[in-house]
Image: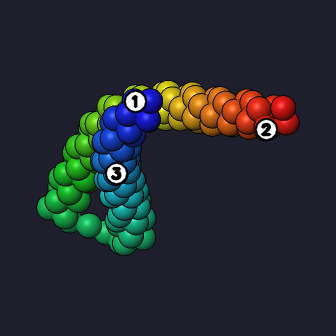
Amino acid sequence: MKIRSKKLDRIVALAHSEERSWAERAGKSRMQLEEQVARLGELNAFRAEYQMKSRQGGRFSSAHVKDYQQFLQRLDAAVCSQQQIIRDSEQAYEVLRRQWMAKRQRLESLERVLEKYRDNEAAFVERLEQKALDELKNKGDQFSAAHDD
């Protein structure tokens, strides 16, 4: 009877390993997403700082103003690009998180089945032991009855 739980035990161990692997993937994806968000924050902070410094300056030549505007346009493009990277990272993280959660649910289901198998096996062994004890008691009673005569 223990064969069922031993076989399932191996399957549960494999499912646990697989679930752990997906959890690690999702965790790495989450960290990458957080890094991208931090980069966006840095770009926005740099842009704000650059704008503030340029406002504090005095008179500028038309060439300087043109360079300033082009630089801000490149910064804006970098911000847009970073926002797209973040959207892509969010989607990738969500896909991995869903796959991890599916693996986790499967593992939990297998663990419940394994626990049920183990409980059934323990109950079966207990019944066998009780039956053996009852038989020994009956033989002992028969032996006592035979020697009492």
Left or right, 21 with reference to 139:
left
- Cα–Cα span, label 3 and label 2: 72 Å
| Viewer-nearest residue: 149 or 58 | 149
Q: How is the image coloured?
A: rainbow
Residue at 33% x, 47% y is 17
- Cα–Cα span, label 1 and label 2: 45 Å
| Viewer-nearest residue: 51 or 37 | 37
Circle 2 sits in a helix, a strand or a loop, which is it? Answer: helix
The image quarter in which residue 64 lies: bottom left
Left or right, 32 with reference to 101:
left
Residue at 48% x, 33% y is 114
Inspect the image, locate mark 2, and give the three-letter code of the amino acid beneath it: His
| Viewer-nearest residue: 24 or 59 | 24
Residue at 69% x, 33% y is 139
For the N terminus, the quadrant is top left
Residue 57, image x, y percentages: 37, 72
Residue at 57% x, 35% y is 125
Say whether disc 1 or disc 3 marks the residue closer to the N-terminus: 1
Q: Mark 1: give few (<14), some (14-19) or many (20+) Cα within 10 Å.
A: few
Of the two numbered discs 1 and 2 in the rendering, the one whose residue sits closer to the viewer: 2
The image quarter in which residue 61 lies: bottom left
Of the numbered discs in the image, which one, if any, rests on residue 4? 1
| Residue that badge 2 annotates | 147
Asked if residue 109 can be seen in this view, the reply is yes
Say whether disc 3 or disc 2 marks the residue closer to the N-terminus: 3
Is the residue 44 above or below the residue 19 in the image?
below
Residue 36, image x, y percentages: 32, 52
Say whether disc 1 or disc 2 marks the residue closer to the N-terminus: 1
Q: Mark 2: give few (<14), some (14-19) or many (20+) Cα within 10 Å.
A: few
| Residue that badge 3 annotates | 24
